[in-house]
Amino acid sequence: MTLNRRRMLTMMAAATLAPGVMAAQGLDLRPRSRPIPEPGDLVTRSGLPGRVALALTDGTDPLALRQAAALLPPASTMKAITALYALDRLGPAHRFRTRVIRAGDMLILAGGGDPALTTDDLARLADDIVGLGMPAPVRFAVWGGALPSIAEIAVEQDDHLPYNPAISGMMLNFNRVHLGWTRVGVDHQISVEARAARHSPRAYTITAMPGDQPDLFTYRHDLEREYWTVSRAAMGRSGSRWLPVRLPELYAADVFQTLCRARGLALPAPEVIDRLPQGQDIAHHDSPPVDTLVRDMLEYSTNLTAEALGLHASGAPDPAQSALAMRGWLDGLGQGMRLADHSGLSDTSRISPYAMTRILAGPGRDLLLSRLLRRNPLADDDHPVNAPVAAKTGTLNFVSNLAGYVTGPSGTEGIFAIFCADTERRKAAIGLEQPAGVSVWTRQAKALQADLLNSFAGRLA
């Protein structure tokens, strides 16, 4: 064995026992760490059609930018801004009260703008008033004036989409009704229910029947009822889905009337009133606190909750003016953005990724938004991210966004926004439920977002 080879073996044996020895000799046999991929390279490699804009900051300085000033549809990432607005203007402990009022010979179900009121909550109110043993009223009314009356959140959306219901101060089951059908012989038996966890009474103000029209659904309403027809050819043997409610006061009053009748209290046919008379509160139900409503809104992306919270916070007469008030609340952070609602469902809102990171860094950190955001939201789509993430997704047809907070291996927190949009295909697909190609495009966008988040975490090491 030569001297040089013997010397090398001795050095390697020493390094095995004491790793610092090799470094002391100027030799490092550790594998080289892989370079952190550049965001632009990841975007190019993904081949995602359309535009990808992104920003990553540490709350003060930018760490990665790509078309970060581009104004794009925020989709449901808008709900992160609405959450901050509601928390600041209303306070995390605020609740919305639904009341039963006795005013002379009239019993009134008075909505307080609770976006989470359910049939089960109305059942408890019915128990309370029946337990009082009072005589049946001569008149029964419902009032929804705590919020503006709005027929639908976004007029460009299809009538039958359950995430685009009416808004009112009297909302029940997120202003949705459950449609179910089963084939009996050559036709279908259809049920329309105000479904909740424990109680699911029939909704008498809403009817549905099979039809032979080419469209999946047709819809109309008069002053007293809503009428749906469902394409017989599309129904199959059995199935179900949620439909939006457009006459929310009558829907809630009808359900409350049914619940009271089941407990032995017969209420007259309901009437909708515009003004709330003086009377005595005989029962009430309080919503969960705003803090909880916000958490659930961010988790399940409920459009109705977002619009209700925003309208409560602003006191404005419609979502557009309410969104304008929210932009004013943002002060300089809102400069250049266009906001049309609080949910992101409207197609006319525009925000840049960099503006979103500034909002999340300012009021977002002040109001501790990250504790309310969903953890690792891409995990359900089988796109693993090797870092802790708290973020809000935003999805429309050919729009897929993600905004929130990512933590690097050292514990450093970064603030990010990734906006993906294929604007040409988006224009052609506005209002459609499932346009061709949208599922593949959305999966591709989410895979890219996961790759970008792994890159972001590496930059925070």
Image: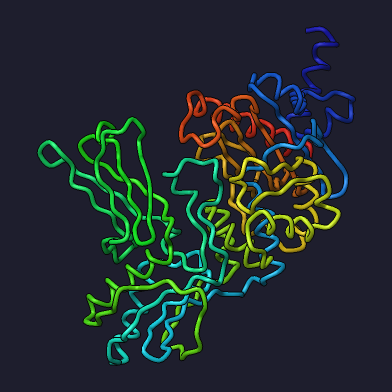
Q: In which quarter of the image is the N terminus?
A: top right
- The quadrant where residue 239 appears: top left
Q: In this view, does 132 lie to the left or right of 387?
A: left
Q: Residue visible at 69% across and 47% down? A: 404
> In the orientation shown, which residue stands out farthest toward the front?
222
Instruction: Please say if 400 is above or below 262.
Output: above
- The quadrant where residue 69 appears: top right
Counting labels gives 0
- Residue closest to the eye, 415 or 28: 415
Residue 323 visible, this orientation = yes
- Residue closest to the eye, 165 or 148: 148
Instruction: Please say if 348 is above or below 261.
Output: above
Q: Position of residue 368 (x, y in %)?
A: 71, 61
- Residue closest to the eye, 246 or 26: 246
Q: Residue visible at 89% across and 25% down? A: 26
Q: Where is residue 50 in the image (x, y as percent from the top left)?
A: 66, 24
> In the orientation shown, which residue stands out farthest toward the top?
2
Q: Residue visible at 69% across and 57% down? A: 321
Residue 30 visible, this orientation = no
